[in-house]
Image (cartoon, rainbow, N blue to C red):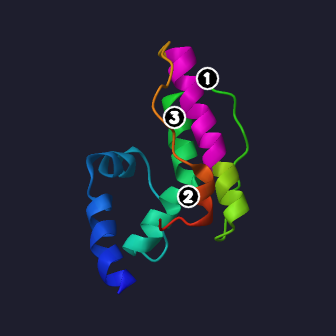
Amino acid sequence: MESEVFTPLLEQFLLTPLVCWVKTVGQPTVTDGTKLSEYIELVDGIYLNEIMLEINPKATVQRTNKKVNNDPTLRIQNLSILIRQIKAYYQETLQQLVMMPLPNVLVLGRNPLS
């Protein structure tokens, strides 16, 4: 039942403009080509951190964990780095303060399919 509901939502999410743009910026490393693996690659934070470095090359480079292997702790660390990089870009480059609530990296890290 869960996959019957989740699969259409996942496919719909992967067709959103932001995800389509992310796919055009670089080459994801998805090996099996399934929608779920594409999504997990985004949620692992490795690819998104690389894109953020292209957007803001002057940012302080922080080591991301390249081999997450479905480890929630490593995923949380990667997503935390990503959130810090986004906030720093807004504050230092755009001179704007992020006022909206940011994604909860603990929830995303522990349960990426939530």
Q: Which residues are magenta?
A: 79-93
Looking at the image, tell me whether mark 1 or mark 2 is earlier in sequence order: 1
Query: Is there CB contact under 8 Å for labels 1 and 2?
Result: no
Considering the image in quadrants, where does the N terminus appear? bottom left
Task: Name the kind of residue labelled 2 in the image.
Answer: Leu
| Above or below: residue 46 compared with residue 58 | below
Looking at the image, tell me whether mark 2 or mark 3 is earlier in sequence order: 3
Q: Can you identify the residue that label 2 sits on? A: 108
Instruction: Tell me if mark 1 has few (under 14), some (14-19) or many (20+) residues whose alpha carbon lies within 10 angstroms of its own.
Output: few
Q: Can you identify the residue that label 1 sits on? A: 58
Instruction: Tell me if mark 3 has few (under 14), some (14-19) or many (20+) residues whose alpha carbon lies within 10 angstroms of its own.
Output: few
Q: How far, Cα to Cα, is label 1 from label 3?
A: 9 Å
Measured as percent of width and height from the top left, residue 2 is found at 38, 82
The main secondary structure of the magenta stretch is helix
Q: Residue at x 65, y 50 (%)?
A: 78
Q: Is residue 89 visible?
A: yes
For this orientation, the residue located farthest to the top is 95
Measured as percent of width and height from the top left, residue 82 is found at 59, 41
> Relative to residue 41, is residue 12 drawn left or right?
left
Q: Which element carries disc 3, helix, strand or loop?
A: helix
Q: Residue at x 26, y 63 (%)?
A: 12
In the image, 63 versus 27, the foreground residue is 63
Q: Can you identify the residue that label 3 sits on? A: 54
Q: Residue at x 72, y 38 (%)?
A: 62
